[in-house]
Structures are given as C-alpha cells and as structure tokens.
Image (tube, grey):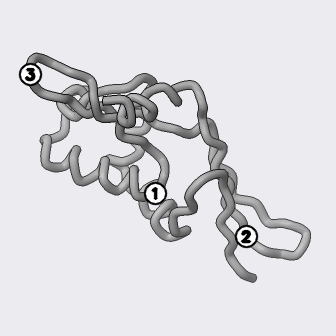
Amino acid sequence: MSLEFSSSGETPGFECVIGALDDEVCREIIAVLEEPMTVEDIAEATDRPLSTTYRKLDCLTDAGLAEEAVGVREGRHRKSRYVANLDGISIVLDDDNELRVDIERSTEFGIWSELQREF
C-alpha cells in the first residue's frame, strides 16, 4: 500500500501533517483558531507558554494547517496573527488500495494572507 498526499496549493509532507495532527498542543491550537489571533492570544487561550506556542505554530504552518498573516499594526509594531486555514481533513483508502490524505482549504480568511503582501 502506498501513501499519497493531495491538496490544493503547496503540498507539505505526509509525515509533517500526521505529526502535527498527532500532537495534543497542535490540536488545541487548531481548536481555538476560529478567527485570526496573535501568538499571545493563542498562548492565553490554550494556557501554554509563549515558547511552546511559537514552536507548535511553526509545526502547524509547516504542515499547511495554519497560516501566518503579518501586517496588523499595534502601535509602532506589526503583529502577526495566525488562522487555521482548513475546513476538513480526510484519510481515505482509494480503489487502488492507496492511502490518501486530502486537506480541504478554507477561503474564509483569505484576506488575512493578502494583508501580508499589502503592508
């Protein structure tokens, strides 16, 4: 049986996606990312240290399960905000007995990724 990863856009490694989904803290972060949030807000919502939150957000963005938008100003500094950019994930066994992972991408917060290019 072979593994195939398919999604729209960039294709992160299968192991990267499964590793992020297997991590309890990553799942907690995905659960709170209903709207764009700063790292500080995410850390507070999940009751995790900032250092852990940054590491897990790196894992989620590498896996294509969250997206960073830079450019929102707070005072003189730009603040990054993160958003979960998926509607669903399916792992299926197709007709050729190949295991496939599909990520359904969300377009609801597409404007947040565009902000990074505009600022």
119 vs 5: above or below: above
Q: Residue furthest bottom?
A: 1
Q: Dot 3, crowdedness within 10 Å: few (<14), some or many (≥20)? A: few
Q: Nearer the viewer, residue 47 or 52?
A: 52
Q: Residue furthest top?
A: 75
* Helix, strand or loop at mark 1: loop
| Residue located at (44% from left, 34% from top) | 113
Q: Say which label, 1 or 2, has the lower sequence index.
A: 1
Where does residue 87 sit, x and y in percent of width and height? Answer: 61, 36
Label 1 to label 2: alpha-carbon separation: 18 Å
Q: Determine whether label 3 and label 2 are within 8 Å by CB.
A: no
Give the residue pinned by disc 3.
76
Give the residue pinned by disc 2.
99
Q: Say which label, 3 or 2, has the lower sequence index.
A: 3
Q: Nearer the viewer, mark 3 or mark 2?
A: 3
At label 1, the amino acid type is Ala
- The dot on residue 63 is 1
* Helix, strand or loop at mark 2: strand
Q: Nearer the viewer, mark 1 or mark 3?
A: 3
- Count the labels in the image: 3
Q: Say which label, 1 or 3, has the lower sequence index.
A: 1
Q: Dot 1, crowdedness within 10 Å: few (<14), some or many (≥20)? A: many
Left or right, residue 5 beside residue 69: right
Where does residue 32 sit, x and y in percent of width and height? Answer: 38, 29
Left or right, residue 51 beside residue 116: left
At label 2, the amino acid type is Leu
